[in-house]
Image (spheres, grey):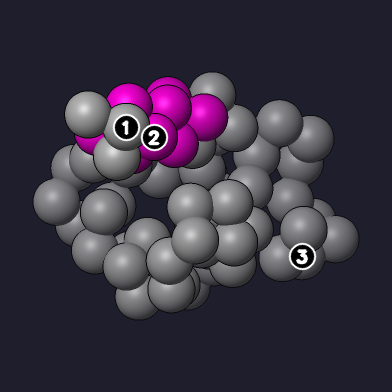
Amino acid sequence: MDSPYTPPGYYGTRDVARALGTSPGAVRNLAYRGRLKRAGGTERQPWYRAEDVARLLTERQARAAA
């Protein structure tokens, strides 16, 4: 996890980037565009729900397989 303070069931920006195979900047862009919703944390270290990350990953894999 990004920080020892990230609660279970949530990911930090670096963890999401690793899971999606992108950069932290791309994760911030996904949040800015509304594709990924922040679920807590601070402005500089947001948390994202694991379910939202899994949904986004499934969408990306389905799009890549098509």
Tag 3 residue: 3
Task: Name the element at disc 1.
Answer: helix
Q: Which element carries disc 3, helix, strand or loop?
A: loop
Q: Crowding near pointer 1: few (<14 within 10 Å), some, many (20+)?
A: few
Q: Is residue 44 above or below residue 6?
A: below
Q: Quadrant of the C terminus?
A: top left
Magenta segment's dominant SS is helix
Look at the image and say whether residue 4 sits in the magenta stretch: no
In this view, the mark in front (3 or 1): 1
Relative to 47, 63 lies left or right: left
Farthest right residue in view: 4
Point 24% across, 63% down: residue? 29
Q: Which residue is mark 2?
A: 61
Residue at coordinates 18% horizontally, 42% vertically from top-left?
34
* Residue that mark 1 sits on: 65
Q: Name the front one of labels 2 and 1.
A: 1
User: Which callout, 2 or 3, points at the residue further toward the start of the chain?
Assistant: 3
